Amino acid sequence: MEKNNPLLDSVDGRTKLAGSNKMEILLFSLGSGEIFGINVFKVREVCQTPKVTKSPNMPDGVEGVISLRGNIIPVIALAKIIHLDEVPEDTGRTMIVTEFSRHTQGFLVHDVDRIIRVDWDKVKPPQTMLAGNDGLITAITELPDGKLVSILDVEQILANAIGIEPVPDLAPVETDTEPAIFFADDSAIARKEIVMVLDKLGVKYQQATNGLEAWERLQNMAARSQHDGSTVYDQIKVILVDAEMPEMDGYVLTKNIKSDRRFEGIPVVMHSSLSSEANRDMGKRVGVDAYVAKFDPAVLADTLRPLLLR
């Protein structure tokens, strides 16, 4: 089976996808017959698994650590994290090196297939029956041959395997008006983390679980404001969007917001695990006002605070 290394693809070419509602997904298997996917932008490289050094007291699913280009990174067995049964003994021979919020880790898989380009409106939130495994599947899409692809929630996988850092004490935002934020993110763990930061800042919020839902709710909000003779800015001061979401990604959502005068004056902050310069450039192309890599609660708070105090 042909293998494709994401590094062989043109980063500039992918940057031009901003606002097109298209994304590239790396397909792989865990030996169970099911097809899984991960956003190409999360992938640094694909390689044969090097020797893994076992360490005591490792969390369940973390096989150990490896030395990769002078850095020690954890190695996670995805089949164990997802609780798959009857996988081949050689599952784990291939490793996908992923980047998440400036952290690097290796995901052990059975085999890597190919890279596909999909329209995000063809990527749907998982049905309840497919959303098991502690919410590790964030979306599904269908291949031309009818096979379903389960797109993994990297945030939730890492939270389950390694844990998340606690949110530090944050000084509340003190303004004459009650600040409010609208945010959209398809990852349950990411939404939980965002809420913890906003609660400590004393900021009210409304939320959506994907880009299309967010856009529909924002349009309804704008229509009500027009009817009442007010503005959307009277209700929300900042919009926080994830980059990759089912049905409509954060780039198209931002493009829609910036092209609608009813949202004039409301900054859009992109909150994404995709922290590379290419992704920042993608955000700039559609008019993002600020870009924050997941998940650093202090940096998120420092980014939101001045926008709320304007």
Image: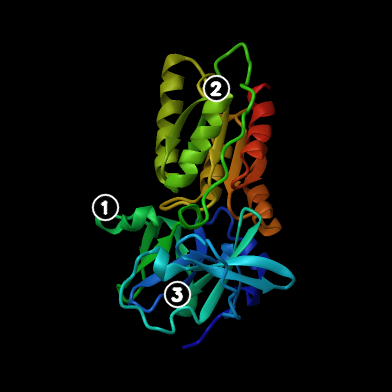
The image shows residue 105 at horizontal and vertical percentages of 59, 64
- The residue sitting at the left extreme is 129
The colour scheme applied to this rendered structure is rainbow
In the displayed structure image, the side of residue 128 where residue 231 appears, left or right: right
Residue at (64%, 44%) from the top-left corner? Answer: 292
CA separation, marks 1 and 3? Answer: 23 Å
Disc 3 residue crowd, few under 14, some 14–19, many 20+, Cα 10 Å = many
Kindly identify the amino acid type of the residue bearing the numbered disc 2: Gly
Mark 1 residue type: Thr
User: Could you tell me which secondary element the residue under label 1 belongs to?
Assistant: helix
The residue where tag 2 is placed is 202
How much space separates mark 2 and mark 3, taking CA atoms?
Answer: 42 Å
Earlier sequence position, callout 1 versus callout 3: 3
For label 3, the residue is 28
Say which quarter of the image contains residue 259: top right
Q: Which amino acid does label 3 sit on?
A: Phe
Q: Is residue 69 above or below residue 282?
A: below
Which quadrant of the structure image shows residue 153?
bottom left
Q: Name the residue under label 1.
A: 128
